[in-house]
Amino acid sequence: MSPSDHNGNARRRLLARGLAGAGALALSGCDKLAGTNWFSHALAQSGPLTEAAQRALTPNDALAREYTKADIAPVFRPNGSIDPQDYDYLDHVENGFRDWRLQVRGLVEKPLSLSLDELRAMPARSQITRHDCVEGWSCIGQWKGVLLKNVLLQAGVKPQARFVVFRCMDTLGDALYYESCRLVDAFHPQTILAYELNGQPLPVANGAPLRVRLERKLGYKQAKYLSTIELVDGYAGIGGGKGGFWEDRGYDWFGGI
Ligand SMILES: Nc1nc2c(c(=O)[nH]1)N[C@H]1C(S)=C(S)[C@@H](COP(=O)(O)O)O[C@H]1N2
Ligand SMILES: [Mo]
């Protein structure tokens, strides 16, 4: 999907949201929440929660709501890149991610290169949460992975580091996808690098082999197809300089919910 398609979709969905009250929204496992939850209405009126508002309203370690197995949508709706055609990525798919490594680099004491097996051997956290896409739909799924905090502690974050940059393997439109967040959000007790969705290895459509879950942030912050985590003191020199693929195209960087 090209960035202009995404914006077109966003506009169409904004219109769809306006009609949701009249029951005009098509229903699926994920969409069924979109017409009723507070977030789509709040978003339509004011956009994402700003950083100042979220930090003023709730402590930094406040938890996102967790749901039960009964709430899990039958199919977790994929969005954005769902089948990357980048050659390096296709090679990884072909050999079952055996040679894939998560690189941790930048302002760290000890750069890491972690295989999926090494990540799976670390203590895991599982959580059932609701994913809110800025386009106006939600979906509940169960994610399992390693706490980003533990990976960062293993690498040793240098004092100058302020942000975590997530580099992805998929080209969307004309650029590689990437994202970033502040260290405090990277150390949040629900921030995980997920390798499982609903009890299965993460499907390609949802970001195999590893994707970020930042549960208090909007969908576009949940970087899929991770290759590298980079600790930086600023992100102005990366990509378009706004801290993420969609941020470079006008979206809010904090993306709070
Ligand atoms: N690498 C990468 N990460 C991405 C995207 C993408 O296109 N590429 N899309 C984002 C958007 S807008 C959303 S809503 C979610 C969708 O995640 P899902 O495919 O598991 O539903 O991934 C986010 N992370
Ligand atoms: Mo999204």
Image (cartoon, rainbow, N blue to C red):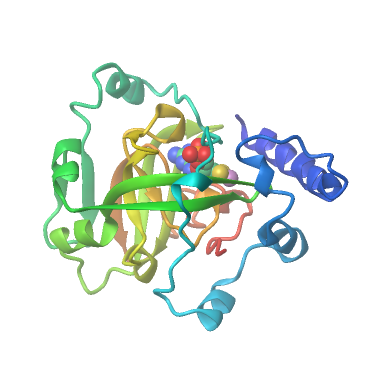
Where, by quadrant of the figure, is residue 113 drawn? Answer: top left
Nearer to me, 160 or 10: 10
Q: Is residue 73 left or right of residue 26?
A: left
x 29%, y 19%: residue = 91
Tell me the quadrant of the picture where the N terminus can be found: top right
Q: Is residue 123 left or right of residue 198?
A: left
| Outermost top residue | 94
Tell me the quadrant of the picture where the C terminus can be found: bottom right
x 74%, y 37%: residue = 8
The relative height of residue 4 versus residue 41 in the rendered view (above or below) is: above
Q: Is residue 176 visible?
A: no
Residue 195 coordinates in the image, percent (x, y):
31, 40
| Outermost front residue | 70
Q: Quadrant of ligand 2?
A: top right
x 61%, y 49%: residue = 249
Q: Is residue 79 left or right of residue 202?
A: right
Residue 2 coordinates in the image, percent (x, y):
62, 31
Nearer to me, 77 or 107: 77
| Outermost right residue | 22
The relative height of residue 246 versus residue 156 in the rendered view (above or below) is: above
Q: Is residue 236 visible?
A: yes
